[in-house]
């Protein structure tokens, strides 16, 4: 999550229109993460997914690499403009 009481949490979160950046804190170590997913809910999901994978034995570097290479679905994240209004 985003609570510093957790063993795994995100801080220094920066979200732009097409990317998010944050620092992943893992048991007092820090890792820079960049992803194509946006929104705090996705960052929380990323942190929890990485936590599960690392605790199951997957190297954290592999997890971060996978998150950085995520390709977003056009239909899921498609932006539609109609009458000057952008729908996301």
Image (cartoon, rainbow, N blue to C red):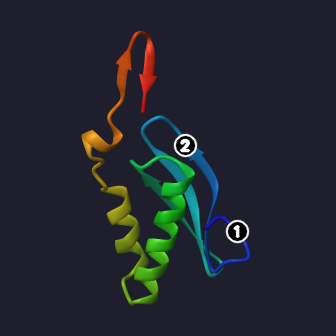
Residue occupied by mark 2: 15
When asked about the image quadrant of residue 52, the answer is: bottom left
Q: Which residue is drawn at 44% across and 72% down?
A: 49
Give the spatial CA distance, label 2 vs label 1: 18 Å
Q: Quick check: 11 above or below 55?
A: above
Which badge, 2 or 1, is on the more N-terminal residue?
A: 1
Q: Give x and y (percent) for residue 43.
A: 52, 58
- The one of 41 and 22 positioned closer to us in this rendering: 41
Q: Residue furthest right?
A: 5
- The one of 16 and 59 positioned closer to us in this rendering: 16
Q: Residue at x 34, y 73 (%)?
A: 62
Judge left or right: residue 39 versus residue 57: right
Q: Give x and y (percent) for residue 42.
A: 48, 56
Q: Give x and y (percent) for residue 83.
A: 40, 10
Residue occupied by mark 1: 3
Give the class, few, some or many, for how many residues have Cα within 10 Å of label 2's Cα (few <14, many ≥20): some
């Amino acid at each position: 999550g985003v609570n510093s009481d957790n063993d795994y949490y995100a801080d220094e979160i920066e979200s732009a229109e097409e990317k998010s950046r944050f620092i992943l804190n893992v048991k007092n170590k820090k890792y820079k993460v960049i992803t194509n997913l946006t929104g705090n809910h996705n960052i929380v999901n990323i942190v929890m997914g990485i936590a599960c994978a690392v605790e199951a034995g997957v190297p954290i570097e592999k997890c971060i690499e996978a998150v950085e290479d995520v390709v977003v679905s056009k239909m899921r994240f498609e932006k539609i403009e109609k009458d000057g209004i952008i729908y996301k």
